[in-house]
Amino acid sequence: MSLIQTHKLFVSVPGKKICSNLDFVAASGEIWGVLGGNGVGKTSLLNVIAGLQDSDSGQINIAGDLLQNWKRKALARKLGVLFQDSVDTFPTSVFETAMMGRYPYLSFLASEGARDEEIVLNALRDVSMETMRERQVNTLSGGERRRLALATLMAQEPSLWLLDEPTNHLDLHHQISLLDLITNRIREKQGCALMVLHDVNLLNRFCTHAMLMIAHDRIICGSLKEVLSDSNLADLYQHPVRRIKNAEGDYFFPE
């Protein structure tokens, strides 16, 4: 089943085209990594798919229905977004912030129940933040805020995940452990992810498919085997790239 589908999608921001005539399908169980140079429009494309920014033309289908047909609350139960950076709008605790992920499931003026608390505590435990539940978010480091943002998204329990640089601010250990957690969760639930990454080797390790945003009229989509090549990556980064093979797989490095 396709969870994201675009048809003849055109997206631009003032003075710049992001994509032209993009046809793209992501199905259940697939994890897509998005690569592109600085300023190519990766974040803008995610925002358009999430319904947070308008396209110029074209169609976006989410789980079989047009994006514009979804009610916002129903869409929030289906689709979750991790933004590039976290903003502390209100002075709240770690637990209260993670509980925001449960709001799409609450009726008007309803309070959180025991099941909501259990889901939030489990999400905090998954990102090793259960002992920080009473901490104020403005006292957290950049990496801790990132882990909290991921816990909030996991508490939301979406089947479609849009992740903008999920490894931002994370050290090597937390990059690997949290990408393991995210990808395992998506596969278990037969969900789907579209995540922006800057490290092609992390993409190659954790994703099933790749989208290379080389130019607005040249976006290459497909399986890793079809898409990840020395020549495609050299075109993407405007720099020579070498593939190194060993018994564990392929790795890509700049020359």
Image (cartoon, rainbow, N blue to C red):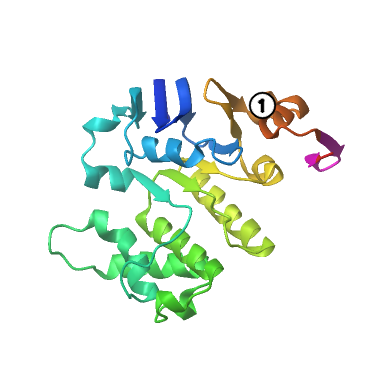
Q: Residue 218, percent across and down?
A: 57, 21
Q: Residues within 10 Å of mark 1 (few under 14, many from 20)?
A: some
Image point (63%, 58%), residue name: 175
Is the magenta region chiefly helix, strand or loop? Answer: strand
Left or right relative to 118: residue 19 = right
Q: Is residue 78 left or right of residue 230?
A: left
Kindly identify the residue that appears in the image at 71 percent across and 44 percent down: 201
The magenta-colored residue range is 242-253
From the viewer's side, name the closer residue of 95 and 188. Answer: 95
Q: Quadrant of residue 86?
A: bottom left
Residue placed most toward the observer, 31 or 214: 214
Name the kind of residue labelled 1 in the image. Val
Label 1 sits on residue = 227
Q: Quadrant of the N terminus?
A: top left
- Judging from the image, what secondary structure is the residue with disc 1 in? helix
Q: What residue sits 45% from the left and 69% below the top?
A: 124
- State whether residue 34 appears in this view: yes
